Amino acid sequence: MIKIVSVRENPQYIEQTVEYFSKKWGIDRKFYVESVNNSINTKNGFPRWYLLMNDDEIIGGCGLIEDDFMVRKDYSPWLCGLYVEEHFRGRKLGKKLLDFVRIHAKFSGIDTIYICTDHVGYYEKYGWKFIGMEQSEFREMGRVYAAKTENFDFWTAIDELIRSSEIVIDRPKDSKHPKVDLIYPLDYGYLSDTSAMDGGGIDVWLGSLGEKSGCDAIICIVDLFKRDSEIKILIGCTETEKEIIMRFINDNDLMKGIIIRK
C-alpha cells in the first residue's frame, strides 16, 4: 500500500531519509543530516521531511525547509527534493506529496510556500503560480513558483473541473451579447459537461495568457434580473484583463460581482 510518512512522527526513518535524498539529488549527506534531525524537535512548521512509501520501500518524498540555497531570503519556506521513482510515475503521486505538504503548511500557520525548479507546466497543473526567475547561491537561475495554502483544496477542485472539461468559446471577443446591447471584451464561454444555475455549463472568461496558465481567480455574480447567483471562472487572464471583466460586469445595474483571487 502506498502512503506518505512524516519523518517527524516516524524518527526511525531518519538515517534512511538522509541517505535517500542525498543519493537521489547527488548532494552531500551533511546538508540533510542537520535538517532531518531538526525536523524531529523543532516547534516551527519547518523543516519537515516526508517519505512516499510502498509498504516498506521508499519510492519518493520531499521536504519543506527554510532556505533552498536561494539568494533571495524573503521567500520562505521552500518545498524541496520532490522525487518519485520512475516506475511509480504517472499515478499523480507527486501531486499527493504536494497536497500533503500544503495541508501541513496550512495547519502550521504558513500561508505561502515556494519551489525552485526547471520544470515548465507541471506545477501549474496543481495550483502553483510562476512568480519569476531567481538566482541560487550557486549562481544558477531557476523558475520560482508559489502556492497559497489557504483554500487550496477548493482551487484544486476548480483546476480538476477545467482539466477534465473542454473550454467552449461560444461568445468570442468583440462579439455582441445575444439579448442586450453589450460587446464581450474577451473570449467568453463555458466548460463542457458541467452544470450552472442557468442549466448550461459553468461560465469561463479566457484571457490572453491562454488555457495553459490555468485559473487564478473566480468572480461571484449576483444577477438581480434572473434573481440568481453563480460563478465565472477566469482562465489565463492578466490583471488588466481582470479589471476589464469586472467593469463589464459591474457597469450593469442588474448584475454585480466580486473577484476572488487564488
Image (spheres, rainbow, N blue to C red):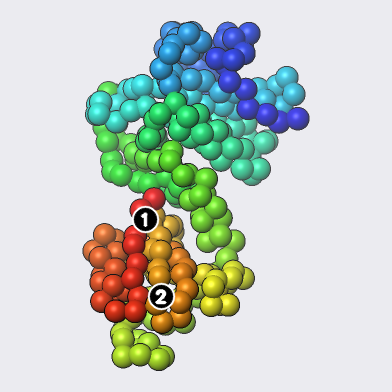
Q: Which mark is residue 260?
A: 1
Is 108 left or right of 68, judged from the image as shown?
right
Label 1 to label 2: alpha-carbon separation? 17 Å
> Closer to the observer: label 1 or label 2?
2
Name the residue type under label 1: Ile
Task: Identify which residue, 107 or 11, lies in the foreground.
Answer: 107
Q: Which mark is residue 223?
A: 2
The secondary element bearing badge 1 is classed as strand
Relative image position of residue 249 (x, y in whole percent): 32, 74
Name the residue type under label 2: Asp
Relative image position of residue 53 (x, y in whole percent): 67, 25
Task: Identify which residue, 57 or 201, lies in the foreground.
Answer: 201
- Regarding residue 234, the answer to whether it shows in the image is no
The secondary element bearing badge 2 is classed as strand
Q: Earlier in the sequence, mark 1 or mark 2?
A: 2
The residue shown at (28%, 43%) is 132
Task: Identify which residue, 54 or 150, lies in the foreground.
Answer: 150
Is 167 left or right of 262, judged from the image as shown?
right
